[in-house]
Image (tube, rainbow, N blue to C red):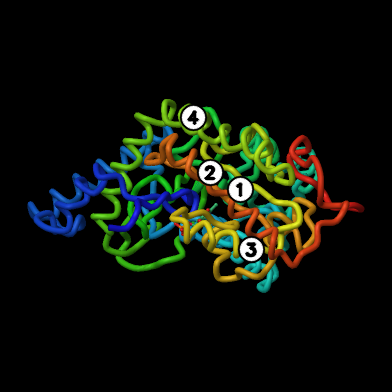
Amino acid sequence: MSARRIYLDNSATTPLDPRVVQAMLPFLDSVFGNPSSLHQEGREAHECLDRARSQVAALLNADPGEIFFTASGTESDNLALTGIIEARGGSGNHIITSAIEHPAILETCRSHQKRGVEVTSLPSDSDGLIDPDELARAFRPTTRLVSIMTANNVVGTVQPINELARIARDHGVPFHTDAVQAAGRIPINVQTQPVDLLSLSAHKIYGPKGVGALFVRKGTPIAPIINGGGQERGLRSATENMAGIAGLGCAAEIASAEMSAEAARLVKLRDRIIETVPDLLPNAYLIGHRHRRLPGHVCLGFAGLEGESIRLLLSLDEAGIAVSTGSACSAHHAHQPSHVLQAMGFDPVRARGSLRVTLGRFNTDTDVEAFLRVLPKKIKELRSIATYPITSNNQGKHYESHCERPAGT
Ligand code: PLP
């Protein structure tokens, strides 16, 4: 029998919680009705749809009428951006976003740019934070939307989202946040946070892949991007993915109930890695903010091995440990530097060199101990074959500064 694998890539995706699987099973079997049908089978499905909507709403302290199911976090992001732009007709053609967003936002902005929409991309500081003053300065009379992520998928930094959203509200501009990494991991309360639109995804919270949701505050003008039979109150046509939606609802309910205890547990495991790694590996440095970060998220660099991060990932994989070098999406661009690290001031070589370790519900102390045991051996092996030279610029005590900027940036 093969040894148990240790999965430390919970920002890429999470395993299904067995309770979520149980909630989904009836929809793959006996509960097959179309929620738009008027007969008993349809009504039964519709009740389940309502229940899942309430469960997701409760996670955000939203009204169930403000939750719209989609097929992914990506679709929620597309719907938020395109839906707001299309809803407002010809007036205003300016979006403010940040340089560290997920491609679901950046590529959508790029596609609008080709059609004449102007995009301001706010810079990040070396910790991955967006400066609220920069946002305040970026507004134009034509600004239609601000979209800034709650927590970054590559480095784990959590933005001062209340402050950013408040500034947008003061300017009378809707504020969208991509909370795909944050929802279910840190508290979100749309009653107290002036966020108008928020994206989330089931597979980041122990639910199934291919289902997401968009929160749209009541009264926010938004147009559909998928047209058809008028499901989801006309905003997102298509017969609902009932098993997926039931799974998302259950995952949201579990997250609501368990988040605070689970976050405290993950912070301990995360900090054990952050505090132990520099003792084991003096050339390691933490990327992202030391404290304003997701509970289970660690992003590390190893001076002199930045060009070897994929080799490091593969050698940890061989030892039974799954981590990533940035984000799952960037596996399609494995040899390209991370746009997030570049925006944080890393040069292109160092921007290829992160190791992302993300802990989740099913990780234990034993997993962390195993990782801390194996990592130094793998780094030592790589150092003996590394092709990228250690220079005075990338050597030394990096840990204190959270993120080492290359000279001159
Ligand atoms: N936004 C962020 C911040 C993400 O991390 C991801 C996925 O990694 C997405 C959006 C896309 O979500 P999905 O995989 O559900 O399309």
Give the residue displayed 76% in from the left and 56% down from the top: 304
Q: CA distance from mark 4 to mark 2?
A: 45 Å
Q: Are marks 2 and 1 in contact (CB under 8 Å)?
A: yes
Q: Amino acid at mark 3?
A: Cys
Measured as percent of width and height from the top left, residue 102 is found at 59, 57
Q: Earlier in the sequence, mark 4 or mark 1?
A: 4
Image position of 202 (left or right of 9): left
Residue type (three-letter) at the residue carrying disc 4: Gln
Distance, label 4 to label 1, CA atoms, is 46 Å
Q: Nearer the viewer, residue 75 or 7?
A: 7
The label nearer to you, 3 versus 1, is 1
Marking on residue 109: 3
Ligand 1 within 8 angstroms of badge 2 C-beta: no
Q: What is the C-alpha distance between the residues marked 2 and 3?
A: 43 Å
Q: Earlier in the sequence, mark 2 or mark 3?
A: 3
- For disc 1, the marked residue is 376
Question: Which of the marked residues, 3 or 4, is nearer the chain's N terminus?
Answer: 3
Does dot 2 land on a helix, a strand or a loop?
helix
Give me the disc on residue 191: 4
Tag 4, which secondary structure?
Answer: loop
The quarter holding residue 66 reads top left
Residue located at (54% from left, 61% from top): 315
Q: Residue at x 51, y 41 (%)?
A: 182
Callout 1 secondary element: helix
Question: Residue 348 location in percent, x, y?
Answer: 77, 63
How dense is the environment of label 3, judged by Cα within 10 Å: few (below 14), some, or many (20 and up)? many
Mark found first going from the N terminus, 3 or 1? 3
Task: Provide the residue designation for mark 2.
Answer: 373
Percent across and percent down for residue 104 are 55, 61
